[in-house]
Image (cartoon, rainbow, N blue to C red):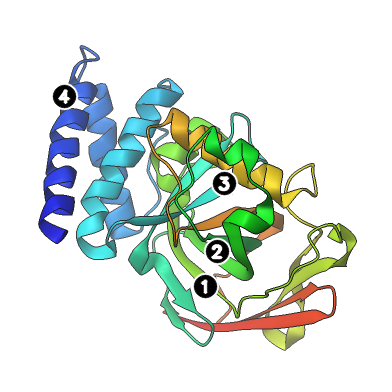
Amino acid sequence: MLRTARSLVISLGFILAATLTSHGSEAPRAALERVIEAYASRTQLTSELPAFDLQTMVEIQDYLALDIGRDYGLVSGYLFDRATQPLLIGLLLENMFSSTGATLQASAGANQVVFLAWAVRINRDLTYPQSEGLSLEAVVAELIPAVVFLDELLPAAQRTQAAALTAVNLGLRYVVLGQPITGVDWSAAGGFHSEILGPKDAVLSEGVGLPGASSDAGALVRLAAEHLHNRGRSLREGDVVVLGRLGEGALLNEARKVTARFQAGRDERRIVFAVRP
């Protein structure tokens, strides 16, 4: 299994390298090298990325995932963000996941941003359009509170551009997961509330309901399956899908301990983690 996975990674690496070269310019490969360096050193890019088409940025993102996969492992989840247009997909690698009580490593070279999210774990292989005929309860076993921690790697002018965010994989660094909630009333969107507390319990960010314009979490999962299909990927059993961000991101440059509170109907969960300089 491991040998097969490594062979697949190597083969995909050659394909991506050829694709980036086939543009007739060294610019995409040079951009890739800058992205890898910024991600590895956790420092903000000193200049904007070129305005490549989204497909090129997706290829850069895939190649970045291959490069950091030596330390972070294989892709085992996705962040699916409807806040940007076109839709934004972040790749979550297995060693990015942590749990409440964790101590995270800060970066001196880039702003540290956290945001609240709800995640779901997929309980079967899910392809598109197969997903159209399945209810949410048939494909999701649990709802998981999550705090997403990222490095702000892009210059200010590109921090809301989906293509540029895709290339740097959103700067995703950690996803801290809380205790799952089962038996969820998915229709009770008004019963979902979350907040991040910083020093002296100051509220740094809060979110109400589920992400996106619709409270139908099933629609979000099916839409995720469709867009991953268009990228040659599919949801697998055990994958975690983060259903977009809730509220505004909060800068954590000064915070050393963070508490996040989540409410889903009568269920309440907390996530606590520290940030080490």
| Residue 246, x across and y down, in percent | 71, 57
Inter-mark Cα distance, 2 to 4: 33 Å
Read off the residue under disc 3: 80
Classify mark 3: helix, strand or loop: strand
**Label 3: how many residues lie within 10 Å, few (<14), some (14-19) or many (20+)?**
many
Which labelled disc corresponds to residue 139? Answer: none
Compared to residue 36, the image places residue 94 above or below, namely: below
Inter-mark Cα distance, 4 to 3: 28 Å
Compared to residue 112, the image places residue 59 above or below, namely: above
Classify mark 2: helix, strand or loop: strand
In the rendered image, which quarter contains the C terminus?
A: bottom left
Instruction: Name the amino acid, label 1.
Output: Val
Which labelled disc corresponds to residue 148? Answer: 2
Inter-mark Cα distance, 1 to 4: 36 Å
**Label 1: how many residues lie within 10 Å, few (<14), some (14-19) or many (20+)?**
many
* Residue at 34 percent of width and 68 percent of height: 95
Classify mark 4: helix, strand or loop: helix
